[in-house]
């Protein structure tokens, strides 16, 4: 599906500069675009683009933010990419404004992608009844239960459609290196980062997570999500659980290249929603290496916690993407 926009010559120059040479005396033209730029912001000497596009996977418009570092803007060499998956209730704006990833990413020459947490604007009964299920709470899976299965296909969206749209963009794609991509996330997004990394090992070079829901089939958040989104309930949910995926022997990539940070003052950690110890245990059980779990005294679940260590997560990705 393409978004068809009629643009003035001035608008076209701003949004799709590569195509302006096709305009002669006509002051209007019709251009089919996959990505629409809603805002362009200069930050940390790079560019932050607020974008939207019509998704054929979710059958809704999808929003995302993209940071391009100054090194990619000024050179012909495209930047490696770190995808950040947000947590429950969040949009692309939260981490963009409060996570402070752009600072270190700008210095190292790393592009950042901030997708949305679910489809929006649907009329599914119950989609907005609770903050931890439905809109902004997709758990980054492809739903198999009615009425969610028609639109809530976030695994396919994140791993297939989103990179295709970004990397094929005439304006923005040339700045991005599609062969060098890593993934990270927070809370529900940390769960998404871990599971998508394990299930799509050809797509990502490393993974990291802040306070991830590491063993969702064993915690209230995950139980609610899997019983709602999946026709097979918790048993099917094992296919979307990092601990169960590792226990199944899915990992074939050697060193896990995984970094996980958890705050000991996090009430969700204290209440058994995160279960990072179970992730550590299964890695040991399976004889795997390359998982580093760090516990930070006193830190909670908020962006104050994330902002304190986001630079180190950027460095973790950069190291495995050849920037360090």
Image: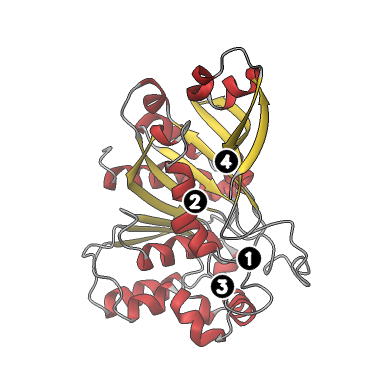
Disc 3/disc 1 C-alpha distance (Å): 26 Å
Q: Nearer the viewer, residue 72 or 241?
A: 72
| Residue to which mark 3 is pinned | 273
Disc 1/disc 4 C-alpha distance (Å): 25 Å
Instruction: Count up the numbered dots.
Output: 4
Going from N to C along the chain, the mark reached first, 4 or 3, is 4
Disc 4/disc 2 C-alpha distance (Å): 18 Å
Image quarter of residue 122 = bottom right
Say whether marks 3 and 2 touch (CB < 8 Å). Answer: no
Going from N to C along the chain, the mark reached first, 3 or 2, is 2
Task: Label 1: state its secondary structure.
Answer: loop
Task: Label 2: state its secondary structure.
Answer: helix
Task: Label 4: state its secondary structure.
Answer: helix
| Residue to which mark 2 is pinned | 162
Q: Where in the figure is residue 175, as x and y percent of width and height? A: 40, 32
> Is residue 77 visible to us here?
yes
Disc 2/disc 1 C-alpha distance (Å): 15 Å
Going from N to C along the chain, the mark reached first, 3 or 1, is 1
| Residue to which mark 1 is pinned | 151
């Amino acid at each position: 599906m393409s978004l068809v926009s009629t643009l003035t010559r001035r608008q076209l120059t701003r949004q799709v500069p590569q195509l302006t040479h096709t305009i002669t005396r006509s002051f209007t033209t019709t251009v089919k675009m996959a990505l629409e730029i809603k805002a362009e912001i200069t930050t940390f000497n790079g560019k932050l683009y607020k974008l939207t596009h019509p998704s054929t996977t979710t059958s809704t418009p999808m929003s995302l933010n993209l940071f391009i570092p100054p090194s990619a803007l000024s050179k012909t060499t495209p930047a490696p990419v770190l995808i950040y998956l947000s947590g429950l209730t969040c949009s692309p704006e939260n981490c963009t404004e409060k996570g402070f990833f752009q600072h270190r990413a700008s210095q190292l020459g790393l592009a950042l992608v901030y997708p949305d947490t679910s489809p929006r604007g649907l009329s599914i009964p119950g989609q907005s009844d609770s903050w931890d299920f439905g809109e902004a709470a997709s758990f980054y899976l492809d739903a198999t239960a009615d009425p969610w299965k028609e639109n809530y296909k976030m695994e396919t969206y994140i791993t297939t459609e989103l990179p295709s749209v970004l990397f094929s963009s005439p304006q923005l794609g040339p700045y991005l290196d599609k062969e060098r991509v890593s993934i990270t996330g927070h809370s529900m997004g940390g769960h998404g980062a871990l599971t998508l990394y394990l299930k799509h090992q050809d797509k990502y070079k490393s993974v990291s997570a802040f306070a991830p829901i590491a063993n969702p089939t064993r915690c209230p958040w995950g139980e609610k999500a899997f019983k709602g989104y999946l026709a097979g309930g918790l048993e099917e949910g094992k296919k979307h659980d990092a601990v169960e995926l590792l226990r199944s022997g899915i990992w074939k990539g050697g060193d896990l290249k995984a970094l996980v940070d958890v705050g000991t003052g996090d009430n969700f950690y204290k209440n058994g929603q995160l279960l990072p110890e179970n992730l550590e245990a299964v890695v040991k059980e399976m004889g795997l290496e390359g998982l580093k779990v760090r516990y930070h005294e006193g830190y909670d679940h908020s962006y104050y916690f994330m902002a304190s260590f986001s630079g180190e997560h950027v460095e973790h990705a950069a190291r495995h993407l050849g920037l360090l």
